[in-house]
Image (cartoon, grey):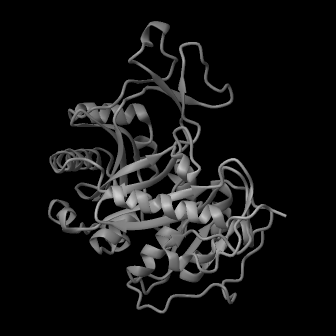
């Protein structure tokens, strides 16, 4: 690896009065465009370190990419940690994937203020069995989960099981199993009873003792229109497509779960709850103890400065926000990740994509391998159905513009 040149012309620093005058915040994760955009909007000076180095990220803030600035760096969190050693910043915030690597988070935080959950918290809350015990102790539901395969008699027409790798996210590697299936021999995972219902998420901000609920979304999973399949996450719409009474009840229960888990695990900053909404109750699936993909939807819909909420909560100051009042007057919003599906593609001319409400924009004519993400689509409407329709239309338009690699 070599140290990148942060003074390069394509690394434009934002011209903003930053509330962190001691120095920039280093943002680290596989893809950091969303968090960088939210941070700059909130008035922070940041340096973004991720793998992809998408073109819009490089227009938002100074950024460093493993793919583009560190020749031969592998696609793994340890490579991001190594690259972070070359960048000077007094504080650090991490994104997706690092919640599964608390030891690497500890390395990232050496000599820096950590704006996020501490390694010990990550170890506990990402353990499904510790999470199950904590939820059940508070009277909340968690699906039947075990380390060993279920017995044959535990399967039935109305009872199915999932196998999940322990260190994953976004539905990667999750598969429904039959009574005669076995788990991949080279991975460690769990067996969890499959629940029918609406897949949703809740976003909250916490100060280690208390939590404030910021938003509820319906998750988009395995949708062919966006090139996803099986259990792969491909977006969110907000609010969920439910009756008002159901959303109000969901709001109350999600807030209670967020406060209970914050007190139990000392959660800090932005966090997410993935859950199944079934028969009027929340069945928590997992906790994402870091800023989640829904953060930019919440920021847009309620005109918040959500990254500022994250930083202040990590420093002990919890924001006042009443979701029950905010959500009914807000527009519906949504995002979808468009995947290359079953063939390699050339992104074509992407220079105008950002102006079309497209984010995580690939560089012009960038080659993208099949089943890899192409970009993120954003939409707004009067309700979630209209938002989803718009996302489908944008996805279809983008697919028409993609080219076959030469």
- Of the pair 127 and 321, the residue shown nearer to us: 321
Quarter holding the N terminus is bottom right
Q: Nearer the viewer, residue 264 or 369?
A: 369
Location of residue 386 (image quadrant): bottom left
Q: Position of residue 229 (x, y in %)?
A: 56, 42
- Residue 53 coordinates in the image, percent (x, y): 65, 71
Q: Is residue 350 visible?
A: yes
Which residue is found at the position 61% from the left and 19% from the top?
182
The residue positioned 41% from the left and 41% from the top of the image is 124
Relative vertical location of residue 35 with respect to residue 248 in this rendering, above or below? below
- The answer to whether any part of residue 269 appears in the image is no
The residue under the point 21% across, 36% down is 280
> Is 57 drawn above or below residue 228 in the view shown?
below
The C terminus is located in which quarter?
bottom right
- In the image: residue 311, left or right of residue 164: left
Residue 397 screen position, x and y as percent = 57, 65
x and y percentages locating residue 220 in the rendered image = 44, 49
Q: Residue furthest right?
A: 406
Q: Is residue 37 left or right of residue 323?
A: right
Between 227 and 31, the residue placed more toward the observer is: 227
């Amino acid at each position: 690896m070599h140290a990148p040149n942060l003074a390069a012309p394509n690394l434009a620093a934002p011209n903003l009065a930053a509330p962190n005058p001691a120095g920039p915040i280093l943002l680290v994760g596989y893809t950091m465009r969303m968090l960088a955009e939210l941070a700059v909007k909130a008035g922070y000076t940041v340096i973004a370190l991720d793998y992809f180095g998408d073109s819009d990220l490089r227009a938002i803030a100074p950024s460093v990419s493993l793919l583009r600035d560190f020749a031969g760096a592998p696609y793994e969190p340890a490579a991001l940690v190594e690259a972070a050693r070359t960048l000077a910043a007094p504080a650090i915030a991490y994104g997706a994937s690092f919640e599964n690597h608390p030891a690497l988070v500890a390395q990232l935080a050496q000599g820096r203020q950590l704006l996020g959950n501490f390694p010990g918290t990550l170890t506990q809350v990402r353990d499904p069995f510790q999470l199950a015990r904590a939820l059940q102790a508070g009277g909340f539901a968690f699906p039947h989960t075990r380390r060993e395969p279920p017995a044959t008699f535990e399967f039935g027409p109305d009872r199915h099981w999932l196998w999940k790798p322990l260190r994953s996210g976004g539905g990667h590697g999750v598969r429904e199993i039959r009574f005669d299936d076995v788990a991949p021999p080279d991975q460690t995972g769990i067996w969890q009873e499959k629940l029918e219902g609406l897949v949703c998420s809740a976003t909250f901000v916490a100060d280690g003792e208390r939590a404030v609920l910021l938003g509820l979304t319906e998750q988009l999973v395995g949708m062919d229109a966006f090139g996803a399949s099986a259990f792969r996450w491909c977006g969110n719409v907000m609010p969920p497509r439910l009756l008002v009474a159901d959303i109000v009840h969901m709001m109350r229960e999600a807030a209670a779960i967020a406060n209970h888990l914050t007190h139990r695990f000392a959660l800090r900053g932005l966090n997410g709850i993935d859950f199944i909404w079934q028969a009027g109750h929340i069945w928590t699936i997992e906790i994402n103890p870091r800023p989640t993909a829904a953060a930019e939807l919440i920021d847009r819909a309620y005109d918040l400065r959500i990254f500022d909420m994250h930083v202040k909560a990590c420093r002990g100051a919890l924001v006042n926000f009443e979701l029950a009042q905010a959500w009914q007057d807000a527009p519906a919003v949504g995002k979808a990740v468009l995947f290359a599906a079953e063939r390699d593609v050339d992104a074509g001319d992407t220079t105008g994509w950002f102006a079309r409400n497209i984010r995580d924009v690939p560089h012009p004519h960038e080659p993208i391998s099949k089943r890899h993400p192409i970009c993120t689509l954003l939409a707004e409407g009067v309700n979630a159905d209209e938002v989803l329709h718009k996302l489908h239309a944008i996805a279809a338009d983008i697919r028409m513009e993609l080219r076959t690699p030469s």
